[in-house]
Image: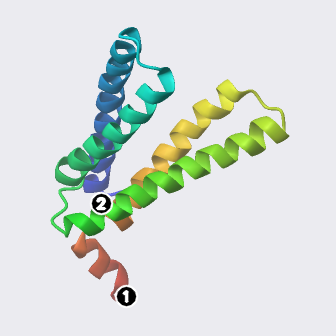
Amino acid sequence: MITRDTRWQLFRFALVGLGSNAVLYLLYLLLTGLGLGHKTAMTLLYILGVLQTFVFNRHWTFRHQGKMPKALRRYLASYGFGYCFNLGMLLIMVDRLGLSHQIVQGILILITAGLLFLLQKYWVFPDPTELSLAQSPR
C-alpha cells in the first residue's frame, strides 16, 4: 500500500518535473530563436534541468536532510541510468522491433519517470526512518 507521504512526494515530484520541463522548453525556444544550435541548447538546458530539479527534489519533494554531495552523486548516477535505460529501450523497441518511436517514447517517459522517482525516494534521498523500519525484523 502506498502511504500518504509517498503520494505527496509523487505529486510534488510530478509538479517539479512538469514545471521544470515547461520552463526549460521555453528557454530552448528562446535560445534556438536567438541562433544557438538545437543540440547545444538542449545539452546546456539538460544540465541546467538536472541541477535545478536536484535542488527542488532534494528540498521540497523529499525534504532530504542527508549529505548533499553524496545525494548529488547518486542523483547524477540515477539520471545517467535513466538516460541509458531510455536509449537502450529505444534501440530495442524502435530500431530492432520497428515499433513507432512516438508511441515508444511516450510510454518510456512515464516508465523512466517512475524509475527515477523510485531511485530518488529509496536511494538518492532516502528517509532514515523508512530505512530503519524496512530493515527491522517483523
The answer to whether 132 is drawn above or below residue 23 in the figure is below
Residue at coordinates 47% horizontally, 20% vertically from top-left? 37
Tell which of 47 and 129 is nearer to you. 47
Mark 1 crowdedness (10 Å alpha carbons): few <14, some 14-19, many ≥20 = few
Name the residue tied to disc 1.
138
The quadrant of the picture occupied by the N terminus is bottom left
Name the residue tied to disc 2.
72
What is the quadrant of residue 44 in the picture? top left
Residue farthest along the bottom direction in this orientation: 137
Image location of residue 127, percent across then percent down: 25, 68
* Amino acid at pointer 1: Arg
Q: Secondary structure at mark 1?
A: loop
Tell which of 8 and 50 is nearer to you. 50
Q: Which of the numbered marks, if any, corresponds to residue 87?
A: none
What is the quadrant of residue 92 in the picture? top right
Residue at coordinates 28% horizontally, 81% vertically from top-left? 132
Of badges 2 and 1, nearer the viewer stands 2
On screen, residue 16 versus residue 84, left or right, reads left
On screen, residue 100 versus residue 131, left or right, reads right
What is the quadrant of residue 95 in the picture? top right
Residue at coordinates 20% horizontally, 69% vertically from top-left? 67
The answer to whether 47 is drawn above or below residue 35 in the figure is below
Image location of residue 76, percent across then percent down: 39, 56
On screen, residue 72 versus residue 65, left or right, reads right
Image location of residue 33, percent across then percent down: 39, 9
